[in-house]
Image (cartoon, rainbow, N blue to C red):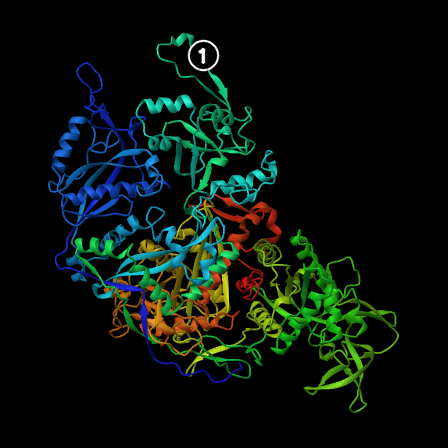
Amino acid sequence: GGGGAPPPRPGEIEIVSNYFRLEIDPGVVWYKYTARICNVRRKKKMDEEGNEVRDENGRKVFAGFQAVESNGDVHELSDQREGLQSLRRRVFGKMREQVREKGADIGYNGGDVVYGNRKLVFDTLESEVQEKGAERGHGIYGPSDPGTSEDPPAAKKTYGTFFVCVKATCDENDADSDLVKNKWFRVTLVESAVVEVSKILSDLTSPPAAFEALQQALDVVSKTTLTKTLTCFGRSPRHFFFPERDQRDICGRSLRRLWTGDSIHAPFVGYTENTRICSNGRVCTMSDVCLKYLTRSSFSDGSPIPVLDARKNTIAGVRVGDLHAPIPPENREAIRLAIGKLTMKVEYVKNFSPKDLQKRRDRGWSEAKIEKNRREVRMNVTMKEDKTSEDEKVHAQIKWTANDPSLHSFEVSPRPRDGEDPENAPPPETHTVCSYFLKRYGITLKYPHMPMVCIGRGPHKVVEWFPIEFFYQSLGKVRNANDPQQVEQHLKFCDEFSGLGIIKKLEELSNNSAIYEHQKNHLRIFGIQKDRSPVSLTAKVLQEPTIQFGKSKANILDGSWNLRDAQFYQPATMMSFGVIDFINRGDEAIKFFGNILSSCRKHNIQLPYNISSGKDEYIAVKNVALMGDIGNISNSFQNAIEKAKEFFWYDRSHFFEERNIWHKSRVLLRARKDLLSWESVLLIPPPNKNIKKCGVIYEGRQPTHYIKHDGQISSARLKVEAVLKRTGETKRVDPFDVHFDGCRHRAIFNDRPEKIEIIRKVFELEDETIIETNFEERDPFFIVDESLIEPISMIFVFLPDDSKRNYDEVKRMSHSTFAIPSQCIVKFRQQRSPHQFCSNIALKVNTKLSSKSNNARAWNTSHGVIEGLPWMPEAPTLVLGFAISRGLGQDSRSVIVGHVALDPGCMQLAPHTSVVQSKTDIIPNNIFEEMTKTLLQHFVSYTEKYPVRVVVYRDGVSEGDFMHVLENECKVLRKVCCQNIPINKRTSSGECNNKCQGEGCIFCCPPITFIVCQTQHNIRVVPKMHTGLKHKNVYSGTCLDQEILDVKDSLLIATKDVPCDPSMCFEDPREAGYDFLLTSQGGLKGTSKPVMYRVLLNENAVWKPHNYAGSALTKTKLQLCTFHMAFQYGTATKAVRIPPVVKYSQRLAGMMMGYIHLMIRDGEIALDRGGDVPKYVTTALNKNNLPNNILHKLSPYDYELGESRPPAFPHNSA
């Protein structure tokens, strides 16, 4: 493995987390209220004659409110509608001011739940509400509320209403907020629950639902001041961003320069906070620093950012060319999409005529008021459809010029003058937007040929269109912010504030004056005190495994090792290959491919038989290499396969014939009636070049050819007559014993290679008669169809860049269309260390070519005297990993991928995939049943054993779905085991003692351990002191299983409900929770992020495996086993963050999501709506290719044919 001995690792390490303790006062009780917000308008007070009443200053007098109704329903401010959440938070913030005047306080986040620190004092009981509802015919929420309930009214519950006035589209402290109209809302609160905070926390026997409800309450209360003082987005905000004016001071050295330029986007530093109830009832807030790119509202000099930038000739960042001519049709869609992603501000200044100015002065207006009246603004608007037309086809968001009446025009009726007869009024005038602003406000548009945008209904209740030159950017989210440059800047920020640096930055932000005092005072009212210092803990450092190469051991340094001078533990065989060069720069790619083959040979990978390094290898590569067409990857992939066949199988170049040698491969034979197997052969080119068949030579004494001798046709075996150079003897050699190394032939005699000189071919008849002369060689004795020959081993693809589109297309060809592993190579000219680069490619090649027959792996791991993983080899254990990749935005597809570990080391894997028309964390039962059944068959075929234990690692589950996933997926898994594992392999008695009727239970099925891998979280753990490593992170293998874990873990959820049978269970196996936080990977840049392993069920800690002397899966063994799995990722020389059985599922799911639309487009798959959940299946168009398609559950190299390497083997995703 190279390198010196690694430094010693400690058994423990002092760490600092991003958790801050919350101390709860004794006897704290909160009250939960459901809230509804609806639009209201003030009712004018009328006198007895029906005239408006005005005060002494001439202002209207109002008498109460009335709800705004639409089609008979009260117009509610929904918490589900995007864009209304900020308005709801402003309404609650205003309502909070009224509540605080009464000596109380509330917590809110914009959703439909509000928490009070004590019972809010209202005048009306709910029993009275029902009575009044009966009188009015509806409930307190308006006509849509029937006012009845199946439950009897609780007399102690109260309700109340608040009327609040807020700015409709901006905060009150925003610039120009005085130009935005106010809007009135009614908030109705109804008491729904009493939250006994202190009581729940002090009693760990409280049900899990009580802790979940309390955690939600704590989270809402703690975030209330953040929603008020910082900028946030969404219904339940998680990220809170500091004001734009402060960003330059807090963004760090790496990002500061980005705030001095004129970019329309900028990196905003923010703050996240989540409240967690931890083990033993402690409460903490988990805080973190976040960074997101948002659209700026102003440049660094404070000037607004126009959507139409005349300096750059761009609209929303899209170049448009000439601003004084209509936009060409080919540019319009890009502009429409770019504007659609923006939140904007409309601003223009009206030019009053001298007559209008005098009128205002005559009314007593000051110059300041006149100037204010000249400015018109619309705050925080977005592009919307104009739905005033009944024809949906003409609902437009944007029109491409402001002065074309054929695109958009409207009529304006002149206002009647005082005393003027309406019948004599002048006729309406027809205007474009351009002419209207000129006539009405004296504004001449600078760019009348540029587009105009609809922003929906404005304050005057009409749909408004404005020219694009009136629009300016507002602060808002950037969609699809995955630009490589932005990602690079994000990584620089993470690297600048890594290790303890991120904790110090977090303390700086949390103690910021904009947060600390507001939050401190608010929490104190709710009986909470927050510790200003983060929680420090002691974590374990788990022991690393031993990594064994072919002839040496690796030196592991913090989870990483190298391949220097290492021969692979079990090298693969690459019998043939193809090369596609999409770079097309002469022989540059071909020459570099020689380095790759050299690295493969150095690591002991078996390259094509009878092709030696040097000149012969270069000739072979030149013959198979194809100059590809990047515009037609499918055709190039197919042509590369055919070109490789022509060289290796059919010897069209006469390479093998000229050297008196043969290409070695394998063909498929039926060993028994029910079993197919592979057989090694030498290939003989077919006599007819137009047929897709090959002659083959089998090992042994079987005939190889038909020959004509003495007028008779006989079957005979080919032999090679040669002279041994060492002794001068003449010998006859079987073709399987002849090898050519590029300079000379060698043959095996008495298990020893000898140099030979070939004289001629001869044939041996069945009676051992040798035919040396006077014969005519006819057809091969055995001729097989090319479909029975082992496919081309691998296609190497040189790509011009790292474009995801090209990569996805190559992998689709590999995974689905042609079912041949591929290896992509990019940026090889930029490598500072080509040898290391080629070694890494050799590692990937070895992993992708792994199969049951070669058991290929670059290394093997061991723990002490135990080979493989801890605990796993004790008994046949089915290890499954599942991941889900969901479509973005409106794409409702989900790709579900499962993998099964085929060997006790969990290094060889087999996949199953499914694509469903649904976005969910939960795998539908019918899909999960099909997947687990297929994966179980893979396992049984490969190991020839039935599992007696099951371990499931599940990714992609949100916390709210834990129990639903556990109940459904465990139930389905037991059913599959029950139906597919013989009863005598599951129980000693041959029947289920629990009488489960074939549905499966713990008494008749293998015990299950179900683990959810939570990767999407904000937990940080960093070393308290410098570790001596180059980075600032914790050691690889740092494990934490105390204090900051979830409270549910300490409730023994994983084993609490597992039944016990003394004869079948371990003695006193239960421990105080099994959850743990593990950092498997070594640190490189930034701050290492651990994985939270939530053990929902651990029957293997309680139940013994059937007929095996296995041990209990204790917390320590589970942690060590999971950590050692991280070293089994066969395509990287480092411990990975998550077990490979899950990581490969994540990777394959993500890749399939990238090219699934291409499979649909080309008709390879189609949506089947026949099941409970619509899913995609292979189509008739792809019928002949079914076994190759990645969605087909069986594979021609799987248990059907005696092999366990599908063509779409998961390692192909590397």
Q: Classify mark 1: helix, strand or loop.
A: loop
Q: Residue visible at 78% across and 91% down?
A: 726
Where is residue 1204 drawn, in percent x and y?
54, 66
Q: Classify 450 as above or below 709.
A: above
Say which amino acid is labelled 1. Pro
Q: Residues within 10 Å of mark 1 (few under 14, many from 20)?
A: few
Where is residue 603 drawn, in percent x and y?
60, 77
| Camera-side residue of 413 and 912 | 413
Q: Residue visible at 53% across and 69% down?
A: 1131
Q: Quadrant of the C terminus?
A: bottom right
| Camera-side residue of 126 and 1033 | 1033
Rendered image quadrant of residue 519:
bottom left
Q: Classify 909 as above or below 329.
A: below
Horizontal side of residue 697 vs 48, given as left or right: right
Q: Residue visible at 63% across and 66% down?
A: 828
Q: Is residue 1125 visible?
A: yes
Rendered image quadrant of residue 996:
bottom left
Q: Residue visible at 39% across and 75% down?
A: 1035
Q: Which residue is mark 1?
A: 426
Horizontal side of residue 300 vs 451, given as left or right: left
Q: Classify 238 as above or below 1032.
A: above
Where is residue 540 drawn, in percent x and y?
33, 75
Total number of numbered discs in the rendering: 1
Horizontal side of residue 913 vs 224, given as left or right: right
Q: Is residue 1008 visible?
A: no
Where is residue 819 drawn, in percent x and y?
60, 59
